[in-house]
Image (cartoon, grey):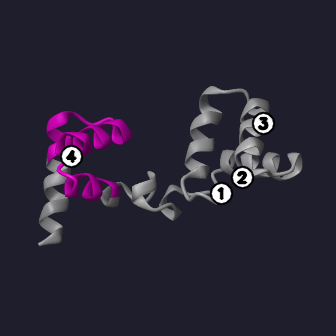
Amino acid sequence: MNPSLPLYIADLLTKTPKIKVIKELRSLTGFSLETAKGFCDAVEGRRFLREQVQPEFGGGSLASRIRLLQSDEGHLEAVRLVQDETGVTTAEARRFIASLDATID
């Protein structure tokens, strides 16, 4: 199973009727109807935690995803990520990222 599948399904569930998400999941995985429904229920119940998914697949802690973006010279994307997930201002996001940089040294 692709490690980013739970995140993909969680995203679909926010904007697509559940029955269509189950159908999509079945087409991607070959799951039975019962298994696909159980998988969607688990994702909805947040039993798949973002921290259990590798950062390169959109998972991991906020800090690990920021570090991954910075390693790819994506500083602006890192700022946007912090803003999207926390609702802070640009200046606050930059200070947060700077504090992460300081903990690495």
Kindly indicate the quadrant of the structure image that contains residue 64.
bottom left
Q: Earlier in the sequence, mark 1 or mark 2?
A: 2
Q: Earlier in the sequence, mark 1 or mark 3?
A: 3
Relative to 97, 26 lies left or right: right
> Where does the image place residue 92, in percent across and percent down from the top left?
18, 41
The residue labelled by disc 3 is: 23
Q: Earlier in the sequence, mark 4 or mark 2?
A: 2
Tag nearer the camera, 1 or 4: 4
Task: Kindly report the distance in space between the C-alpha atoms of the residues bearing marks 4 and 2.
Answer: 32 Å
Q: Are marks 1 and 4 in contact (CB under 8 Å)?
A: no
Task: Kindly report the distance in space between the C-alpha atoms of the residues bearing marks 1 and 3.
Answer: 20 Å
Q: Earlier in the sequence, mark 4 or mark 3?
A: 3
Instruction: Please state which amino acid type lies under the numbered disc 3.
Output: Lys
The residue labelled by disc 4 is: 74
The residue labelled by disc 1 is: 47
**Residue located 19% across and 39% down the image:** 76
Kindly indicate the quadrant of the structure image that contains residue 71.
bottom left
Task: Kindly report the distance in space between the C-alpha atoms of the residues bearing marks 1 and 2.
Answer: 5 Å
